[in-house]
Amino acid sequence: MKIVLSVGGSMINPDGKPDVTFLREITKIIKESKHEFGILCGGGIVARAYANAARELGASEYDSDNIAIISTKQNAAILVAALLNGGVEVENKVFDNFDDAKRTGKKVVVMGGTIPGITTDTDAVLLAESMGAKRLLNLSNVDAIYDSDPRKNPKAKRFSKMTYEELISLATASDKRMAGTNFVFDLLACKLIARSKIETHFVAGKDLNGIKAAIEGKTHEGTVVK
């Protein structure tokens, strides 16, 4: 089975320094799995910092996006290095487009962001569509989908299951379409998983058992959208 992992930059580089422990752990999970993977890496705090600095300096949203994309590709490159050195059959490059990524015969392909105006959430879903993957995992520093930010609202409602329509409704209220903004899953990505009926799991990146369960389509502590 082909599965796409959308790995948030907060997992790969949480504070300006790559998390070697996480990189080794996700490598081990992928190596032990029988499935094929497409992996799309986000930019995280580094991408947000550069995008915001670019705006402050007067850059356009287009240019701010392009600067943020560089950070996603750097995160993707360090993940490729981890996979290669962990004995995983991965293409030794960061792919720039979906057509090339879907044609490789390797067990794993890795991408960063693609073009301005498209978030890595949407990139991940487009990668899933191009590969024919029917399951997508979103790994981030949030353990599930909530109706508001649980870090700011202790009474935020947590969802264990959602329909595509419910997720679209939630994303509509939070999607600002700006590089470096932080929301659960952007609106376009939500509409794309709905149109292709891609089963999507939102799992805390540090929840290794949850990641393993989600890969197999089993119950975990995060949120399942289908």
Image (cartoon, rainbow, N blue to C red):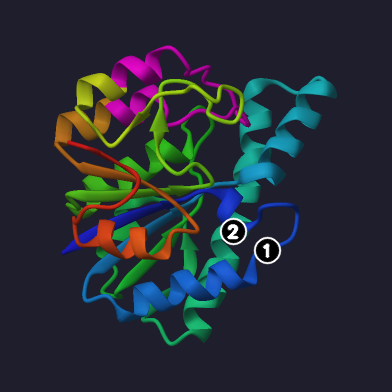
Q: Quadrant of residue 170?
A: top left
Mark 1 burial class by Cα count in 10 Å: few <14, some 14-19, many 20+:
some
Secondary structure of the residue carrying tag 2 is: helix
Q: Which residues are magenta?
A: 168-190
Residue ID at (30%, 24%):
167
Q: Amino acid at mark 1?
A: Pro
Q: Is residue 152 left or right of residue 126?
A: right
Q: For residue 169: magenta?
A: yes
**Where's the N terminus, which quadrant?**
bottom left
Q: Which mark is residue 12?
A: 2
* Circle 1: element type: loop
Kindly give the residue lying farthest to the top in the view shown. Answer: 173
Dot label at residue 18? 1
Rendering quarter of residue 91: bottom left
Numbered tag placed on residue 29 in the rendering: none
* Circles 2, 1 touching at the beta carbon (< 8 Å): yes
In the rendered structure, which amino acid carries the disc numbered 2?
Ile
Q: Position of residue 5 (x, y in %)?
A: 36, 55
Residue 16 painted magenta: no
Q: Quadrant of the C terminus?
A: top left
The x and y percentages for residue 54 are: 78, 29
